[in-house]
């Protein structure tokens, strides 16, 4: 049912919000090729087709290495602006109307882009995307966990001392193994004290104890992935009771080998337990996916029809940090789209 062309068409036109998607990881081969052409000495292929091969990786560690070679292409403010606007163009094509984009300022600042120039570049692109494409962007600044406490300090400094207008949340990404969540508590405390929301990654490549750590130490309001919560009934009960949502990214979990096959993906189990879920794409071009594909996969795993898919889209808006008028407007767009669709298919 869910793989029907009909439902795919419904998903493609459905106004959507995305809550878990990375800035650099969203660079489509076209954008990466443009960046690589600006920096000819880079070893990243310049041809979009060769790039697709380049992005085939074997495990999570290998993925991080490839990811960092693309990070290395972001060398000046113009690269940042080009990347950000290119990502918004790809979102517009998928009818994504709102996205909280995870940005890692530390990676760029460490490579010599001055913090202020970096922030101006993303803000310029954000305003242009809203004006020209109707895509509303907000930022989540995340600590690249593998870079340790220096990265945490720098990310917290930028997020709390010079927050750009679009900044709404504070996160923690990178590998989980050997990177205890609790280590980052002081930085999350500072970010939360300035009004930022807490959205760490947890329970993607490690067990439910990491999710508990993210909840208790980092006061997580949403969890990046959190899929290993399915192994802990008490944790699922906690998430359901407190209505703490998981940002689920099915294809990413397969690509990084966090979950073996889609058939074994815990999404249905989480939903059955009443855990709120949203559907997301993580690093879409690198994983050969996009948000519409992820909605199709979720629909298949959960056996959803158009109304069920629309409810998933509403979840993403409800659990977003979009202001109330913006959220009401987007929920209205979803309702109207569904009603029109149903009226045409009695
Ligand atoms: Zn992620």
Image: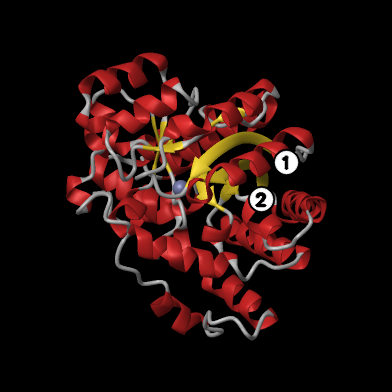
What percent of the width, then of the height, locates residue 123?
77, 49
**Would residue 281 be found to the left or right of residue 229 on screen?**
right
In the drawing, what numbered circle is on residue 57? none
Discs 2, 1 touching: Cβ within 8 Å? yes
Give the SS element for disc 1: helix
Residue 125's quadrant in the figure?
bottom right
Identify which residue is drawn at 75% across, 37% down.
Answer: 163
Is residue 146 in sight in this rendering? yes
Q: Which residue is mark 1?
A: 158
Image label count? 2
Near mark 1 (Cα within 10 A), the count class, few <14, some 14-19 or many ≥20, is some
What percent of the width, then of the height, locates residue 55?
41, 72
Q: Which residue is mark 2?
A: 105
Near mark 2 (Cα within 10 A), the count class, few <14, some 14-19 or many ≥20, is many
What percent of the width, then of the height, locates residue 38?
69, 80
Give the SS element for disc 2: helix
Residue 138's quadrant in the figure?
top right
What percent of the width, then of the height, locates residue 90?
58, 61
Identify which residue is drawn at 70% across, 24% down.
Answer: 194
């Amino acid at each position: 049912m869910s793989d029907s062309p009909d439902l795919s068409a419904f998903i493609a036109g459905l106004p959507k919000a995305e809550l878990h998607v990375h800035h650099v990881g969203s660079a489509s081969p076209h954008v990466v090729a443009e960046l690589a052409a600006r920096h000819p000495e880079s070893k990243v292929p310049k041809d979009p087709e060769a790039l697709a091969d380049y992005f085939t990786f074997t495990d999570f560690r290998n993925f991080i290495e490839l990811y960092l070679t693309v990070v290395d292409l972001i060398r000046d403010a113009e690269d940042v602006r080009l990347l950000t606007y290119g990502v918004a163009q790809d979102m517009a094509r998928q009818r994504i109307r709102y996205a909280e984009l995870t940005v890692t300022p530390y990676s760029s600042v460490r490579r010599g882009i001055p913090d202020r120039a970096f922030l101006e570049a993303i803000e310029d692109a954000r305003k242009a995307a809203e004006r020209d494409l109707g895509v509303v962007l907000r930022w989540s600044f995340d600590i690249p966990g593998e870079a340790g406490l220096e990265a945490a300090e720098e990310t917290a400094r930028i997020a709390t001392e010079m927050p750009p207008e679009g900044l709404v949340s504070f996160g923690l990404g990178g590998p989980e193994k050997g990177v205890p969540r609790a280590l980052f508590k002081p930085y999350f405390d500072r970010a939360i004290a300035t009004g930022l929301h807490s959205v760490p990654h947890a329970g993607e490549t490690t067990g439910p104890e990491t999710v508990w750590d993210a909840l208790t130490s980092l006061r997580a309001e949403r969890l990046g992935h959190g899929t290993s919560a399915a192994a802990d009934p008490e944790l699922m009960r906690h998430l359901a009771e407190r209505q703490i949502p998981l940002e689920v990214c099915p294809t990413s979990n397969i690509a990084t080998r966090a979950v073996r096959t889609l058939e074994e993906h815990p999404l249905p189990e989480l939903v059955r337990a009443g855990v709120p879920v949203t559907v997301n794409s993580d690093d879409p071009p690198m994983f050969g996916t996009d948000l519409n594909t992820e909605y199709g996969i979720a629909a298949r795993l959960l056996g959803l029809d158009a109304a069920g898919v629309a409810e998933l889209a509403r979840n993403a808006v409800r659990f977003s940090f979009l202001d109330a008028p913006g959220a009401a407007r987007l929920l209205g767009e979803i309702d109207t789209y569904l009603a029109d669709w149903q009226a045409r298919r009695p």
